[in-house]
Image (cartoon, rainbow, N blue to C red):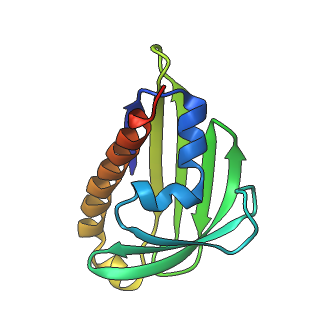
Amino acid sequence: MVTEIEIDRPRERVAEYAADPDNAIEWYANIDAVEWRSTPPAEIGSDIAFTARFLGRSLTYTYRIVELVAGERLVMSAAEGPFPMETTYTWRDTPDGGTRMTLRNRGRPRGFVGVASPLMARSMRRANLKDLRQLKAILEAEPR
């Protein structure tokens, strides 16, 4: 599932903010807590636990950063838990000096989440768009 948005801020700023797990609580509506399982800052091999609300349940999952190209791409993978997933952020310059951010989630649900898979996909798509809109609002409210 892929969701995209244009943000009227330079790519370096958008990537810096979005790639910092400590900012996730501000722009992801369903994330309640972030806990570093390794020493910050984010780098390949870093482990970060997120606690999120989804479909009325609280889930904690640990992402490992598997790829990080500053200002261009971040790939995180969660192999454990009810929903093994890979999340990828990419950032590209727009012609007018802004940023096109892409959020891509791939995974295979298990257990309760697997049973609710079609509902989950629709819910995730709505949540991702809402989250990207919140990210846009936060960054575009910053002084230039």
The part of the image, by quadrant, that contains residue 12 is top right
Query: Is residue 34 shown left or right of residue 41?
Result: left
Nearer to the camera, 85 or 115: 85
Judge whether 121 appears above or below 135 on screen. Answer: below
Q: Quadrant of residue 63?
A: bottom right
Q: Residue furthest top?
A: 95
Q: Is residue 141 left or right of residue 51?
A: left
Looking at the picture, tell me which residue is in the foreground, 126 or 122. Answer: 126
Q: Residue furthest bottom?
A: 111
Q: For the point 47% across and 23% down, which residue is it?
A: 98
Give me the residue at 26% from left, 62% from top: 123
Identify the residue at horizontal 54%, vertical 28% (top origin): 92
Number of numbered discs = 0
- Report the front residue among 5 and 78: 5
User: Image point 49% across, 58% down: which residue?
Assistant: 24
Residue 134 horizontal side relative to residue 22, left or right: left
User: With 136 as the anchor, is 43 left or right in this view?
Assistant: right
Relative image position of residue 120 (x, y in whole percent):
29, 68
Return the residue found at the far front.
143
Q: Position of residue 143 (x, y in %)?
A: 46, 30
Above or below for 58 versus 29? below
Could you tell me residue 81's position as x and y percent?
A: 51, 81
**Residue 126 in picture, x, y percent from top left:** 26, 54
Compared with residue 5, is residue 52 higher up or lower down, i.e. above or below?
below
